[in-house]
Amino acid sequence: MKVVTIIGARPQFIKSAPVSIALQNLGIEEFTIHTGQHYDPEMSDVFFEEMRLPQPGARLDCGNLDHTLMVGKMLLELSPILAREQPDYVLVYGDTNSTLAGALAATKMMIPLVHVEAGLRSFNMDMPEEMNRILTDRMSSVLFTPTNAADQNLQNEGFGTFPVKIAQVGDVMFDALHSFLPQSSYHPSMGEPHIFSTPFVLATMHRFENVNDPHRLKQLVQELNNVHYNVMPVWMPVHPSTAKKLTEHGLVLKVHQGPPVGYLQMLWALEHCAFVLTDSGGLQKEAFFMKRPCITLRDETEWVELIEIGANELFTSKDTNLAKALERMASKEINYTFAGYGSGNAALKIAEILLKGSI
């Protein structure tokens, strides 16, 4: 059996690591295509090195383009590779442009498509990621869901009547965290060690709706600066697109800053921080796995169960006091016993199901 895996963004490198190991252990051949969506070495190459991911069989140059041009270029370059490799399955992850382009390429060539992390919904059609999720799910032959909520979303949309196999396997990011946490490490590029010697907030911000809206970006910069000076020091690895927009709009982020970090450094920061402020889907879950209170800098989240159990709270575009929200989270007793993300063997389940060809 042969699987072509299409990845291109930081979260996908993390998600693919345990699955690649599981495929290899079961003797399934994997050919990886890196679309180049994240082309900065700090957002790409470092993950292949530290997570021992198989080097891509093909690397595309499809980064630094707007959504339409990026997906179009990926589709154009993916098709001849798939025609040459003739896989049994095309495997995609999550909700990025690389996900959608891989889904379109596989569907056009009538190759069965497998979507890992299927069924997630924010119910915000203004988000590019939401459209990517819905379209990819609809084109897929096999949907691997992480939670009951994802299963329910698919049922609500009529997937029970479609010619598609659905299996809840758990969350592959849970697999990755437990596999790589023992190797987590501090790196000098993160900043001076004393920054991390007292309780601090780990913050990340990169979503389109936050960094491309000047009013929202200004609001979040002001709120983060206020938290940093009046509640607790904030450390933030700054995403390249965020850095560009801050410069464009003349905004000054006065928190402790560093460049994008690898997965092992992010796990180290998670392990040592007191709180998490983020708009990242993956980091919301990782904060929960590490039992760190999290505030999500968005109007909605796909991980609704974290809101329901109180481990996560939204800071929406209508909210105005992030410091107060942080203090409120600090006073809560949070239940971290939710078991809905599986038991850390999602990758093995995925590989076994593909090998057997049945669910």
Image (tube, helix red, strand yellow):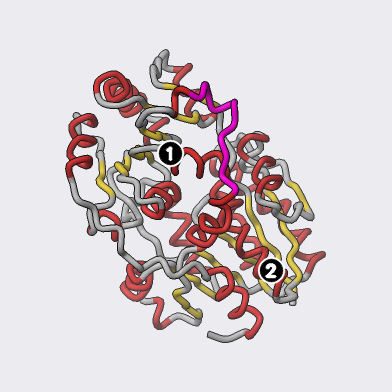
Judged from the image, the secondary structure of the residue bearing numbered disc 2 is: loop
Along the viewing direction, whichever of 319 and 134 lies nearer the viewer: 319
Q: Residue at x 43, y 35 (%)?
A: 204
Residue 284 falls left or right of residue 95: left
Above or below: residue 144 compared with residue 17: below
Residue 190 located within the stretch drawn in magenta: yes
**Amino acid type, callout 2:** Met
Along the viewing direction, whichever of 233 and 85 lies nearer the viewer: 233
Along the viewing direction, whichever of 335 and 78 lies nearer the viewer: 335
Q: Quadrant of residue 220?
A: top left
CA–CA distance in space, label 2 to label 1: 47 Å
* Residue placed furthest toward the right: 84
Q: Residue at x 70, y 64 (%)?
A: 4
Nearer mark to the viewer, of 2 and 1: 1
Above or below: residue 229 compared with residue 217: above
Residue 299 located within the stretch drawn in magenta: no
**Amino acid type, callout 1:** His
Along the polypeptide, which appears first: circle 2 or circle 1?
Answer: 2
Q: How many residues crowd around disc 1 within 10 Å: few (fewer than 14), some, or many (20 or more)?
A: some
- Residue 285 % position (x, y): 40, 53
What label does residue 272 carry, if any? 1
- Res 168 seen here: yes
Q: Residue at x 51, y 25 (%)?
A: 193
Judged from the image, the secondary structure of the residue bearing numbered disc 1 is: helix
Q: Which residue is mark 2?
A: 109
- Res 73 seen here: no
Residue 288 falls left or right of residue 30: left
- Residue 133 % position (x, y): 46, 59
Please provide the residue range marked out in magenta: 183-193
